[in-house]
Amino acid sequence: MNAESVEVPDAWAKLRRQSWARLLRKVYEVDPFICPKCQGTMSVVAIIEDPAELTKIIEWAKKQEKEPPLTVCAVSPPELALLLA
């Protein structure tokens, strides 16, 4: 992708995004621009239209759901009295 192919969002593009967000909010009762984890404001950073790239992203997300998160259990240090006994 070269610099000439990057489009600057115009007023119409902004209006379309707002309409999209309004429809999602109305139909699914969810604001697509509010983070479900921290309730912070999100924004669109990219639009991916290449099916191959979308497939890679979806497969990666599915893999993340299947693998349990790695957790490290905290262990307290051994008691000095037990070591001396």
Image (spheres, rainbow, N blue to C red):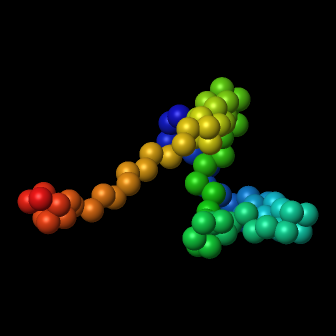
6 and 49: which one is in front?
49
Q: Is residue 11 above or below residue 49?
A: below
15 and 71: which one is in front?
71
Seen at 86% across and 63% down, the residue is 28
What residue occupies the far right of the structure in this picture? Answer: 27
**Quadrant assignment, res 27:** bottom right
**Quadrant assignment, res 65:** top right
The answer to whether residue 13 is left or right of residue 39 is right
The answer to whether residue 71 is left or right of residue 57 is left
User: Does residue 54 appear in this view?
Assistant: yes
The answer to whether residue 52 is left or right of residue 20 is left
What residue occupies the far front of the structure in this picture? Answer: 85
What residue occupies the far left of the structure in this picture? Answer: 84
Q: Is residue 36 above or below residue 56?
A: below
Q: Position of residue 5 (x, y in %)?
A: 58, 40
Q: Position of residue 20 (x, y in %)?
A: 81, 60
Q: Position of residue 2 (x, y in %)?
A: 50, 36
The quarter of the image holding the C terminus is bottom left
Badge count: 0
53 and 83: which one is in front?
83
Q: Position of residue 66 (x, y in %)?
A: 61, 37
53 and 72: which one is in front?
72
Q: Is residue 56 above or below residue 21?
A: above
Seen at 56% across and 38% down, the residue is 67
**Quadrant assignment, res 74:** bottom left
User: Does residue 12 appear in this view?
Assistant: no
Seen at 21% across and 61% down, the residue is 77
